[in-house]
Amino acid sequence: MNRVYNFSAGPAMLPQAVLEQAQAEMLDWNGSGMSVMEMSHRGKEYMSIAAKAEADLRTLLGVPDNYKVLFLQGGASSQFAAIPMNLLRSRTAADYINTGAWSKKAIEEAGRYCTVGIAGSSEASKFTTVPAQAELTLNTNAAYLHYTPNETIGGVEFPYVPESGDVPLVADMSSTILSRPIDVSRYGLIYAGAQKNIGPAGLTIVIVRDDLLGETLCDTPTMFDYKVAADNESMYNTPSTYAWYIAGLVFQWLKDLGGLAGMAEINQRKAGKLYAAIDGSDFYSNPVDVACRSWMNVPFILANADLDKTFLAEAKAQGLTTLAGHRSVGGMRASIYNAMPEAGVESLVEFMADFEKRHG
Ligand SMILES: *Cc1c(COP(=O)(O)O)cnc(C)c1O
């Protein structure tokens, strides 16, 4: 067996310990005589798996009791519609901060349901920074304020949590959730597709304050209604059972590692090493404002784009894979989520220095 360091933006690496445990439990979970994939979601065994995953996630993030944790399907992209459907609550406008490709998708979808106010945008800088709190124009009648704490494609993150007063704050945390501690009570709703920092694709997590539930737009499909999901413990229909189970193993792995404070320390160190390597060379560069650089997604370009293909091929030969930048921006991008070992980042940094020496 030869595992590579996979720098994919998502689906991304999972901790090896998690994969090994899943492998060990594949044919017979805990004496049940079956795989988790084959279990009834309403059976006692699976209910215990689901409940433990939720309890561990609540512990990790310190989710207050007045928040529901939902295990849904449809990806973060479905939430782009579900959020206005659930949170408009007879208001007609919502505010969005535009900091890149994922913000734009959320804005476009919300525009089908309400008047979208752009509370701030960093488009003029080509999304290499985020607007400061003082630059935000907030509508006090907005149903909510939506932002993307970490833009996965641009590699830009907010160094602060926007202050939205009485307007509920909504965050697309798909590529940053569980990378560090957060104060959940600052948010009305947090959502994330699982395939970056949680587990396999097919699971989407929504954490929502319970006073925001129960007043959906009249055409909201039952499956998009958070209250229906909450009232049925995310089992109104068959949930993404196996992905939920793997997410539970990831939560346990994080707890064993010292929780999110421990994870944050490791993540900060990993990102620090990679940015230091980029900044310390004349051959590699990253355009993002230093204060807004992502810990999770590190885009960089080579001084000579003609070398991109060679870089990718040589990296791959050394077991460093999926380093091509998003098709919309080109260059390189190293996604270094929680499950990327520090040794993987060190190996990339070494390779980059060696590549520069030979081709720079
Ligand atoms: C990946 C990603 C999405 C899309 O997630 P899907 O689960 O594929 O719908 C949305 N927002 C952000 C910030 C992402 O990184």
Image (spheres, rainbow, N blue to C red):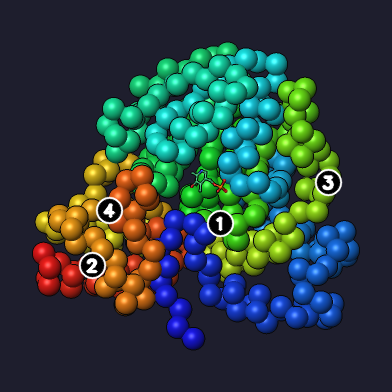
The type of residue carrying mark 3 is Tyr
Q: Is mark 1 within 8 Å of ligand 1?
A: yes
**Where residue 195 is drawn, which disc sits there?**
1
- Which residue is at a point 42% across and 47% down the rendered structure image? 152
Whether residue 13 is situated above or below residue 82 in the rendered picture: below
The type of residue carrying mark 2 is Thr
Towards the viewer: 27 or 250: 27
The type of residue carrying mark 4 is Gly
Towards the viewer: 325 or 137: 325
Judged from this view, the residue extending furthest toward the right is 43
- Which residue is at a point 24% across and 60% down the rendered structure image? 308
- Disc nearer the start of the sequence (1/4): 1
Mark 1–mark 2 CB contact (< 8 Å): no
Which quadrant of the view contains residue 242?
A: bottom right
Mark 3 = which residue? 236
Whether residue 261 is situated above or below residue 316 in the rendered picture: above
- Disc nearer the start of the sequence (4/3): 3
Which quadrant of the view contains residue 42?
A: bottom right
